[in-house]
């Protein structure tokens, strides 16, 4: 059995400001995020990893590099462009409120009704496109590392859609489980790199947060 530990990158300036980053926006990690990555490493340290994979976008790549540095074990890191965030077209860099005013229907569907989202309106990727590219990468990583533990560091929207699709969630219900938080861990297992089971969803207890910040989760 292969276990895939899927990590959403640390929190960034645009996350805090409620702006869409997508595949082309890439604001810096917040100072506090580096400490949270260390806490994540403390949580994962007992696990031996065969390989790590990360999106080339700086917020994910730096999260992966810092995480591996603090794991105290040799883990090879491969950067794979298929793990990039959803290309959000004209929404990228915009504040959530501004998107809601300009494209209220598209934003509602993006957040709650993936089957009704029309990517052509904002020039973004479709859910099907994101799931195809990220899903193909995860399946390939599992084929390359049978019976091993692997790390995948990527982005909230892309991971949320792909994880749910890999476990067989129908498109209209991709968002039913809720969002993924910054520096969270979600775990999938597979025996054949084709069929996946959800073992853990959006684990963040190791961050020891006492209050809920809505800008942490997408």
Image (cartoon, rainbow, N blue to C red):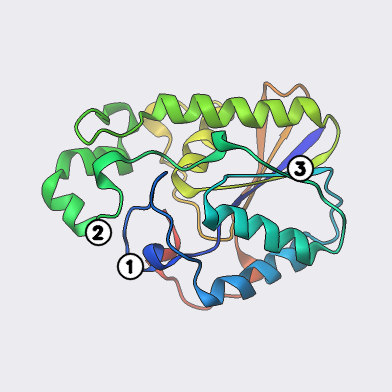
Total numbered circles: 3
Place of residue 51 in the rendered image (x, y in percent of width and height, measured from the top left): 79, 43
**Left or right for 65, reference 172:** right
Q: Position of residue 187 (x, y in %)?
A: 67, 45
Q: Is residue 128 left or right of residue 90?
A: right
First in residue order: circle 3 vs circle 1: 1
Q: Marks 3 and 1: CB-CB under 8 Å?
A: no
CA distance separating discs 3 and 2: 34 Å
- Cβ–Cβ below 8 Å for labels 1 and 2? yes
The residue wearing badge 1 is 17
Q: Residue at x 39, y 46 (%)?
A: 24
Callout 2 secondary element: loop
Identify whether 205 is placed above or below 108.
Answer: below
Where residue 183 appears, as percent x and y from the top left, is 58, 60
| Labelled disc at residue 95 | 2
Mark 1 to mark 2: distance in Å? 7 Å
* Left or right: 35 in relation to 88: right
Q: What residue lies at 67% left-to-right and 23% top-to-bottom?
A: 195
Residue 150's label in the rendered image is: 3
Give the residue drawn at x 35%, y 28%. 126
Query: How dense is the environment of label 2, judged by Cα within 10 Å: few (below 14), some, or many (20 and up)?
Result: some
**Few, some or many residues within 10 Å of mark 3 (<14, 14–19, 20+):** many
User: Is label 1 in a helix, a strand or a loop?
Assistant: loop
Which of the two labelled residues, at mark 3 and mark 2, occupies the earlier sequence position?
A: 2
Position of the N terminus, as image quadrant, is top right
Furthest-left residue in view? Answer: 101
Please, what secondary structure does the residue beneath circle 3 have? strand
**Depth check, front residue: 68 or 3:** 68
């Amino acid at each position: 059995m292969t276990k895939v530990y899927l990590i959403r990158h640390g929190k960034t300036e645009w996350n805090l400001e409620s702006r869409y980053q997508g595949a082309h926006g890439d604001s810096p990690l917040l100072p506090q995020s580096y400490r949270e990555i260390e806490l994540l490493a403390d949580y994962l340290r007992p696990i031996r990893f065969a390989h790590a994979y990360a999106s080339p976008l700086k917020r994910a790549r730096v999260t992966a590099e810092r995480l591996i540095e603090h794991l105290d074990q040799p883990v090879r890191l491969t950067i794979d462009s298929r793990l990039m965030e959803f290309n959000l077209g004209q929404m990228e860099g915009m504040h959530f409120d501004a998107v809601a005013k300009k494209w209220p229907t598209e934003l509602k569907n993006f957040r709650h009704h993936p089957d009704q989202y029309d990517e052509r309106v904002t020039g973004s990727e479709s859910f099907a496109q994101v799931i195809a590219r990220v899903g193909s990468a995860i399946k390939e990583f599992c084929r390359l590392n049978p019976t091993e533990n692997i790390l995948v560091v990527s982005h909230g929207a892309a991971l949320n859609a792909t994880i749910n699709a890999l476990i067989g969630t129908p498109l209209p219900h991709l968002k039913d489980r809720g969002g993924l938080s910054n520096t969270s861990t979600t775990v999938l297992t597979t025996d054949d790199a084709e069929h996946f089971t959800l073992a853990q969803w959006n684990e963040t207890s190791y961050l020891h947060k006492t209050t809920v910040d809505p800008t942490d989760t997408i």
